């Protein structure tokens, strides 16, 4: 039913249209699923998280997390504390390593059957239930005489990834969130959103994550814990998988079509917790259009991990559920994921190893059909999604394109298309190698920061390559994460060039080749060119116009005299 003054539509809202919310969200009606979730876990006596010891009124400060970790170490010899990085404001960002036994070093893991699983919480430091849930989980595993999971899994936990943001607690942060009383801020100590920094790597947290977690421990699975915004539904847990179609498709499909359906069946049956894929309505005025996920770009952590041929799961806990329900929902989700990894550790290891091998093989002699996708668009998956939502009331607001949206207590289940399948509309060929005749240290440092193998020519080489002649560069009007992101147009042209000694060479016969292409392809929507790393090279220093992008694509395999950088 619609009228000009008041429109009653069904259901949920897009974040973009949410008006400022009241200080506290209205008390939730406890659904059967949430009530059941809240009864699942009774904390054992002794060591308690801040959330537990305050009856879920508060969340842990950085100091409280650190003293909890020290208490865990007193509880068990199976706990080691490592440091991911020192934050901008000087905090050591902790990594908890739990193993039976603790591996002497990560290399020792290669010779046993265990896999490393990494749980990261608090990347957005107002979204805090992953911090509490992961600390509880560590304790409960260590206190259980059976030491569950540890025969197959080495557990890595970063409970407070954005440590600087965590301690800027205020009741004014995330005002629509249903508890705790105070939470931290989204940004890190540099005012950056860490979940947009995976490609440009400008924060100590992201650089430390790659160096001290991904390259050091090579976790097979990465779980990133967040809290939703905006949409109304009953399910306390929402989730996603790596979305970027330039990653290995077998990994994406495995997590999406096999692993997550099984994990979520366990979550419901064994842990009595409901879950749905992460999303918002495509159009809150016309709900038949469907449910839509976020974006495919690898600046988002879980998409980035997919580009590295590893598994990743995004956990987004439901903002309007009370804090205890959210913590326990997240706790149960983590356990359901570990249950899965425990029984299929070998299968997961093989999946990642096969993806690495396929990637290297492809790079040795790339074919016409080996392509990189551009102009990526989202389409609906074949399966519809079922969401236990609510009817909402929408009231137009004078002078604003955004109406006021209020949830009613009237429940309604919606079955609709789920827009979460990202497909390129255009492709370009993947090369044998990228050649970069650039001599400052910034570009190789960026590439090597991701763990890519980078070489330099030891003698000049004349090669037929494809160049990208830049015709137009537009920096965005709006500053974003400290950048005016570029939109670039140009033409491809085959040319023969002499590359001087010292030219950087990035070969595609390496496991991280999909990431290399995303960073270096001239038309990549999240590459180094977009993030301004090549600005000084593509702009003419005198006069008008633009220069050729200094990253050349070599298609034909060649013997190149080159040395690795150390
Ligand atoms: Zn978040």
Image (tube, helix red, strand yellow):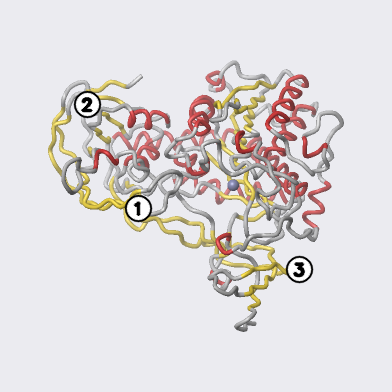
* Of residues 178 and 291, the one drawn nearer to the viewer in this rendering: 178
**Relative horizontal placement of residue 346, taking residue 534 as reference (left or right):** right
Q: Is mark 2 within 8 Å of ligand 1?
A: no
Q: Identify the residue at horizontal 31%, vertical 43% (top origin).
A: 521
**Residue at numbered disc 2:** 560
For residue 23, which numbered disc appears in the image?
none
N-terminal of the pair, mark 2 or mark 1, is: 1
Which residue bears the numbered disc 3? 409
Which of discs 1 and 3 lies nearer the camera? The answer is 3
- Residue 327 or residue 164, whichever sits in front: 164
Q: Quadrant of residue 518?
A: top left
Residue at screen point 23% across, 39% down: 552
Label 1 neighbour load within 10 Å: few <14, some 14-19, many 20+: some
Q: Quadrant of the C terminus?
A: top left
Q: Which residue is located at x 17 percent, y 48 percent?
A: 544
Q: CA distance from mark 2 to mark 1?
A: 29 Å
- Dot placed on the residue nearer the N-terminal end, 1 or 3: 1
Image location of residue 348, percent across then percent down: 55, 37
Q: Which quadrant of the figure contains the N terminus?
A: bottom right
């Amino acid at each position: 039913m619609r009228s000009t003054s008041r429109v009653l539509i069904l259901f949920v809202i897009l974040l973009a249209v949410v008006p400022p919310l009241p200080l506290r969200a209205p008390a939730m009606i406890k659904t059967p699923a949430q009530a059941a979730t809240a009864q699942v876990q009774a904390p054992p006596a002794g060591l308690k998280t801040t959330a537990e010891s305050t009856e879920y009124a508060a969340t842990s400060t950085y100091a409280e997390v650190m003293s909890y970790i020290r208490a865990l170490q007193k509880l068990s010899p199976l706990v080691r504390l490592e440091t991911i990085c020192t934050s901008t404001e000087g905090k050591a960002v902790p990594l908890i390593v739990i193993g039976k036994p603790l591996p002497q070093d990560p290399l020792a893991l290669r010779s046993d059957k265990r896999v490393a699983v990494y749980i990261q919480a608090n990347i957005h430091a107002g979204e805090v239930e992953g911090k509490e849930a992961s600390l509880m989980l560590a304790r409960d595993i260590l206190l259980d005489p059976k030491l569950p999971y540890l025969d197959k899994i080495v557990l890595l936990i970063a409970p407070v990834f954005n440590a600087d943001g965590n301690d800027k607690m205020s009741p004014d942060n995330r005002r629509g969130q249903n508890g705790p009383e105070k939470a931290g801020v989204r940004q890190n100590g540099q005012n950056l959103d860490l979940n947009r920094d995976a490609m440009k790597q400008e924060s100590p947290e992201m650089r430390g994550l790659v160096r001290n977690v991904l390259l050091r421990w090579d976790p097979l699975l990465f779980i990133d814990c967040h809290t939703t915004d905006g949409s109304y539904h009953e399910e306390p847990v929402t989730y996603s998988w790596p979305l970027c179609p330039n990653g290995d498709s077998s990994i994406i499909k495995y997590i999406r079509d096999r692993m997550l359906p099984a994990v979520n069946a366990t979550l419901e049956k064994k842990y009595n917790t409901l879950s749905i894929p992460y999303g918002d309505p495509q159009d809150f005025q016309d709900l038949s259009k469907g449910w839509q996920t976020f974006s495919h770009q690898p600046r988002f952590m879980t998409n980035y991990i997919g580009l590295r041929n590893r598994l990743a799961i995004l956990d987004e806990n439901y903002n309007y559920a009370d804090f205890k329900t959210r913590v326990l929902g997240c706790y149960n989700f983590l356990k359901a994921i570990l249950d899965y990894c425990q029984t299929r550790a070998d299968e997961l290891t093989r999946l990642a190893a096969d993806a690495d091998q396929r990637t290297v093989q492809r790079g040795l002699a790339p074919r016409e059909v080996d392509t990189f996708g551009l102009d990526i668009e989202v389409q609906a998956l074949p399966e519809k999604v079922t969401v236990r939502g609510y009817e909402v009331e929408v009231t137009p607001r004078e002078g604003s394109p955004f109406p006021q949206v209020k949830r009613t207590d009237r429940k309604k289940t919606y079955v609709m298309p789920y827009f979460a399948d990202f497909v390129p509309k255009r492709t370009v060929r993947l090369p044998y190698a990228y050649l970069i005749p650039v001599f400052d240290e910034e570009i190789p440092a960026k590439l090597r920061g991701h763990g890519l193998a980078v070489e330099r020519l030891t003698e000049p080489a004349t090669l037929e390559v494809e160049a990208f002649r830049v015709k137009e560069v537009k920096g965005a009007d709006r500053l974003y994460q400290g950048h005016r992101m570029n939109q670039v147009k140009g033409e491809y042209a085959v040319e023969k060039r002499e590359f001087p000694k010292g030219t950087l060479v990035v070969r595609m016969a390496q496991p991280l080749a999909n990431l290399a292409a995303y960073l270096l392809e001239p038309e990549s929507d999240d590459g180094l060119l977009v993030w301004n790393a090549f600005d000084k090279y593509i702009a003419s220093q005198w006069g008008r116009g633009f220069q050729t992008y200094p990253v050349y694509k070599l298609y034909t395999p060649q013997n190149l005299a080159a040395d690795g950088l150390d």
